[in-house]
Image (cartoon, rainbow, N blue to C red):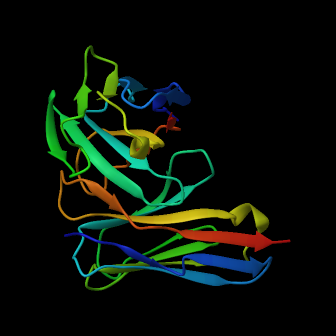
């Protein structure tokens, strides 16, 4: 059974701090994706990583895919209140397979 | 950017009633999905649909659930006899292919409340 775990579940930090959230699984994934979800809205894709060890940057966000393709991390530098939201990791084991989601990390950035 | 459209945004129904949730996927997309999210819980896969048939379904997607693509644009989820535990936000999603690097687009969801 595919399962994605995320940690921490909740994170509250001051504006300007750095943070890292983690996504882990015992399964190997062909791709891992990170989404951000606002209350009452659907998830919005931030990035997809497909190669073990891959690092992608999106402004102040840095995403890394583990070498074994079982885990990923999201690092935010100098967090801003606009970064507040639910960050979801999701994975797809093989092509044409379903995408499954982790439980999410709820981030609150306090001005 | 193109959007997945879902209607209604909110649906309130009595237990035992049938509901149909509607979605208009992005026009050239070929793969369609329904997910649900119970309040405070994770986004759960329900069903995937391609080439006018179900590709995969989860244990949640029992005989009370069905999906249909009645024309070239709509994709619907029907719950025949709703239960209290069906209360959740239901998301439709679509993408062009099923490839692992293909972007999955989500609608804004239908909040279903079963009373």
> Measured from the top left, where is residue A78 in percent x and y?
73, 78
Picture layout, residue A66 above or below residue A44? below
Residue appearing at x 74%, y 83% in the figure: A17
The picture quadrant where one finds residue B21 is top left
The C terminus of chain A: image quadrant: bottom right
> Measured from the top left, where is residue A38 in percent x and y?
62, 52
Furthest residue to the top? B71
**Left or right for A94, reference A4:** left
Residue appearing at x 29%, y 73% in the figure: A51
> Measured from the top left, where is residue B98 in percent x and y?
22, 47
Furthest residue to the right? A111
**Left or right for B68, reference A45:** left
The N terminus of chain A: image quadrant: bottom left
Count of residue discs: 0
Picture layout, residue A35 above or below residue B97? below
Picture layout, residue B24 above or below residue A67? above
As rendered, which of B113 and B15 lies closer to the eye? B15
As rendered, which of A89 and A9 lies closer to the eye? A9
Residue appearing at x 39%, y 29% in the figure: B26
> Measured from the top left, where is residue B25 in percent x and y?
38, 29
């Amino acid at each position: 059974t595919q399962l994605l775990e995320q940690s921490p579940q909740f994170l509250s930090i001051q504006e300007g701090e750095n943070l890292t959230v983690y996504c882990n699984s015992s399964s190997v994934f062909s791709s891992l994706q990170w989404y951000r979800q606002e209350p009452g809205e659907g998830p919005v894709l931030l990035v997809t990583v497909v190669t073990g060890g891959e690092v992608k940057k999106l402004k102040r966000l840095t995403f890394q895919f583990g070498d074994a393709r079982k885990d990923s991390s999201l690092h935010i530098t100098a967090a801003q209140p606009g970064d507040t939201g639910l960050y979801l990791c999701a994975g797809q084991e093989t092509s044409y397979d379903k995408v499954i989601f982790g439980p999410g990390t709820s981030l609150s950035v306090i001005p | 950017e193109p959007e997945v459209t879902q209607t209604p945004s909110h649906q309130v129904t009595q237990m035992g009633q049938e509901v149909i949730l509607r979605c208009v996927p992005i026009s050239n997309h070929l793969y369609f999905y329904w997910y649900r999210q119970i309040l405070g819980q994770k986004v759960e896969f329900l069903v995937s649909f391609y080439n006018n048939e179900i590709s995969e379904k989860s244990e949640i997607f029992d005989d009370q659930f069905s999906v249909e693509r009645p024309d070239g644009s709509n994709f619907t989820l029907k719950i025949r006899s709703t239960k209290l535990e069906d209360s959740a936000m239901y998301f439709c999603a679509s993408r062009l292919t099923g490839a692992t690097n293909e972007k999955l687009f989500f609608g804004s969801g239908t909040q279903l409340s079963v009373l």
